[in-house]
Image (cartoon, rainbow, N blue to C red):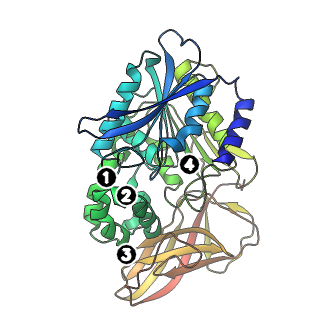
Amino acid sequence: MSRVLVILAVFLVWAAPAQAFSKQSGTRTMGDGTSIAYDLYLPDGTAPVGGWPGVLVLHGLGGSKDDMATIAGTFAAQGYAALAYTARGEGTSTGFLGLSGPDEISDERAMFDYFAGLPQVSDLQIGAWGISYGGGQIWDGLAAGIAYKAVDVVETWTDLFSALWPQNVAKSGIVLGFAKTVESRSPLIQQYENDAVHSTNMSAIKALVDPRSAYSKLSSIKTPVYMFQGRVDYAFDVTQAENGFRLVGGPKKLYVGQFGHTPSTFPGPDVAYVLSQGVAWMDHWLKGAANGIDKAPTVTIAAAAGSKRATFAGLPKTKALVLHSGMKLKTAVETFGVSTIKVRVKSINTYPRLVATVIAGNHVITHGAIVPKVGMDTIRLANYVQHIAKGTRLTIRLGPDSGPLDIAYLGFADQKTISLGKATLTLQTLPKAL
């Protein structure tokens, strides 16, 4: 958090002059008696006619409103009212966590209505900023018709099932980590945890999480959405934001940056850029600022290190590079898109999951898994943006888990044997490395 505050200070120097603001804390009681804790940030001085434009700020899984103090303070210092609240079943809010279910969306709507009803806040100019679990709730709130004027969604999902159970196999290390964070206050998580981690009863898991995803309603969303997604995020890969960018019917932008869930972190080294873009998005749509951020939809991708960025007029085209295990790259590449591994399965004797991990030296490039069947199988790999230097030798590891270098796919010693033939990797890359 100290690092966030330093970066925030740098951002505020770079941005428009900062306003002083005050913070008030309180609770709101929901219709079922659940108490939701909140912090309200208000700029000092006289509010403009109609009230300050407002931003709801939603935290990640296992967090609280306190984690969002820097983000809420950023908006308040730029002339916004900000309301950060703690989701039910987390922090000092009461109730049980329902994984962005109907209760959470009802809470989100109630907090929006409370915020819009304050005399200091404009009831017509309210946006939202959410990260991870909070970003997912914002997508779900948009799908449910909450009247946000504009939103920033950060390192989150649009389709929870394909994010955490791609090809019907759990990213078990990630799913287990999420579950252990909140299981003590979520009977729902306790009920489904074993199946969710071990990739059993997948039809029930899909039935649970599909209504908690906005994917099927993305094309009906006309609200301006700025998507911020991490280059390498084991929970929510770039495809989750690509879904939104392809399908949302309103104004949109996508930034793929140096942050995310494990093995990345938030904040990343580009957090000042993320905040400045997020504020500029709100400035245009909530304040009417003619800052040009509303121009044609663009996708910006940050380099793996430093401040270099490349901007594309839409999702960038990719080229396919076909490789076999042990081959060296003839040129530097930047992965982007869904790469695949084709492998011939000759025979199976109790092998519930086959995990593929693509490795460059001691660095994991991407991974994926399937429930194998005899014949030619295709494993879709996670969409991470990775820079791979010229001359790098890539290795494909196939087995019951993603190996000692990787936590995404855990093994459970529930397999016997599998016989495999040749494996071929088709790597999707940008036309030119960043």
Q: Of the residues under marks 3 and 4, which one precedes in the sequence?
A: 4
Disc 2 secondary structure class: helix
Q: Nearer the viewer, residue 273 or 68?
A: 68
* Residue under label 4: 229
* Residue 158 percent coordinates (x, y): 42, 48
The answer to whether any part of residue 128 appears in the image is yes
Answer whether residue 145 is visible to the viewer in this image: no
Which of the numbered marks, if any, corresponds to residue 371?
A: 3
**Mark 2 → mark 1, Cα distance in angstroms:** 7 Å
Q: Is residue 384 above or below residue 330?
A: above
Tell me the kind of residue under disc 2. Phe
Left or right of 107: which side holds 286? right
Q: Residues within 10 Å of mark 1 (few under 14, many from 20)?
A: some
For the residues labelled 1 and 3, say whether their Cβ atoms are less than 8 Å apart: no
Spatial separation of the CA atoms under disc 1 and disc 3? 21 Å
Asked if labels 1 and 2 touch by Cβ distance under 8 angstroms, the answer is yes
Name the disc covering residue 210, or none: 1
Q: Residues within 10 Å of mark 4 (few under 14, many from 20)?
A: many
Say which of marks 2 and 3 sits in front: 2
Of labels 4 and 1, earlier in sequence is 1
Q: Nearer the viewer, residue 430 or 207?
A: 207
What secondary structure is found at the residue carrying circle 1?
A: helix
Q: Which mark is residue 25?
A: none
